[in-house]
Image (spheres, grey):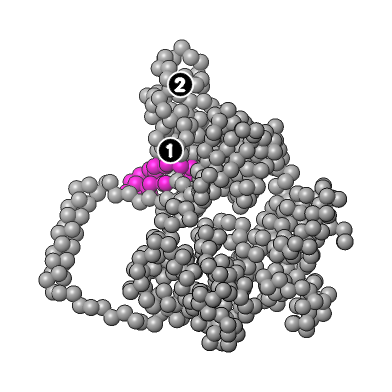
Amino acid sequence: MSKDQDILEIQLWEALRSGEQAALQKLYMSYYKNLLQYGLRYTDDRDTLKDSINNTFLYFWEKRESIGTANHVGNYIFKSYQRQLVKDLNSSNKFETLQEGNDHMEAVDVEEFQFIIQQEENTRVSILKNAILQLPKRQRELVLLRYYEGLSYDEISLKTSLTKRAVYNQIHSAINSLKKDTNLKNLKQILPLLIFF
Amino acid sequence: MNAYQSIQDFILDESFFRYAVRQDPSEIVKWEGYLQQHPEQAALIQLAKQELLDMQNALYLVDAEQNYARLIPQLDTPVRTIVPKKKWTLYAAAAVLLCLMATLWVFQYHFNQSQTMAYQTQPAEKKTIHLPDGTLVKLNAASKLEVSDGFGKTNRAVKLVGEAYMEVAKNKALPFTVATQALQVRVLGTTINVRAYANEELTAASLIEGSAEVILKSKAKSPIRLKPKDKVVAAVKESTSPSKSSAPPHSQEEGYKMETVTQYDAEQRLAETSWTQQKLVFVNEPLSSIAKTLERWYNIKIEFQDADISARKYTAAFDDREELQYVLESLRSSIPFSYRKIGPRTISIYLTNQ
């Protein structure tokens, strides 16, 4: 893992230990995707996975005064999550065979986990995120099912008891409004702008 | 397979989603085949892929925020009990604090003119500032604007390191001055863009409208008057030839050049102020200078293996929310170069075939 990244993480960790909730949130946002993706290898039960993530960070917050300094913050977060996940999955009997040190839980390769501190509000992704939050509730739900959970139009139709055509049309118009709100639109305008000598 | 024409056609397609996001092996085979049959759509497919991946990340953020919101109420349970400290430490602390305050007061009393207010931006950050006199300032990335004490009352002086666009409120009694390392700009009411980064050799002041005067710090000479669309470009360091006056006016030997602002598109928008409209615009600019702007905007370091490349001039315009990789790919498609990541935030640019 790179030096800069380590330093940034350690700073956040120290801020968390001294009681800064903003630092907790930053670490949470940065690791959420990786933790969730990791959990999805073992279960499709997103609700349990999300609870485990929250339990892990709640533990950090409540124990912030007694937990130690961490030289490898990512490693520590990840190991804690793994323990929490085993506990939560076992208690919900969703995955009885899962045990710490079990073959099911492969060794953690933290190197593969990207730690991304969100640059404030200027990245494409944040703009897109805000645009998604602006969508009507129904459309937002359908977009999440389609592009986040990766369900097909048929599966969504079954789940929501809308016709497949209606699902498609709703998602189509959601994509259109996202395009309006973000630089999906700008991309097309910019291409002709690329004037080279 | 359907006829795919727009980005949306790809984005809405289930099979394309499985290819771009899930990287389903059978879909990869299928779409690579499609790409071979439709090479003209390569760019479109690349964009659609990028949009889908951005959307993934955006959706993760949406989900993360929603889930974090559930966590917040649980965080606020009071668990801490404060252990009372020994009394003498409290007294000592109070005494120290008192001394400190007294010292501060004495300092302020004697040097009260030195109190300044500073606005600062990080790399990849921009800020809009409303100064108390009604002036609007947009501060570009990695810049600092210091406002002196008494601003708006006894003076309107600011100090700038970096780049700022200013719509200066009219006030005849109090001229607005911008001081940079190389020059000072004095205006009554006007719109002006000043670029004075510490790591750049040239400082530029571009007048958009109104009138202004520029005084170069290196030469004690009469102020340069600016008309709208004038641009003064001054060297930050003392020019090497100190020869005097025989040179024609506005020549480089006087330590500055007069130029005109650059219109970069049909709508006559200006390259100088394009950053305030979320654009990255380079007009016939050496790669070395483009790199400095990219460094600030993407918060990275760019190193050149060959001085040769850094001197090449490029013209291009991008949306400033574009991915860095896209910007680099576009640049190198006109005059080729190679680049690779050599650190977490460091990119090396070198000659192709090396």
Residue B71 seen anywhere in this rendered image of the structure? no
Camera-nearest residue between B130 and A149: A149
- Indicate whether B331 appears above or below B33: above
The residue beneath circle 1 is B198
Judged left or right of residue B275, residue A8 is left
Q: Quadrant of residue B60?
A: bottom right
**Residue located 50% across and 30% down the image:** B233
The magenta region covers: B144-170
Mark 1 Cα within 10 Å, few/some/many (few <14, many 20+)?
some
- Give the side of residue B108 with respect to residue B95, left or right: right
SS for callout 1: loop
In the image, B319 versus B352, the foreground residue is B352
* Residue B94 placement (x, y as % from top left): 16, 67
Instruction: Give coordinates of residue B79: x percent, y percent.
Output: 34, 81
Q: What's the magenta bit mostly, secondary-structure-wise?
A: strand
Query: Left of B278 or right of it: where is B186?
Result: left
- The type of residue carrying mark 2 is Glu
| Residue in view at x 68 percent, y 56 percent | B50
* Residue B9 locus on image (x, y percent): 80, 61
Considering only vertical position in the picture, is A161 above or below A118? below
Q: Residue furthest top?
A: B246
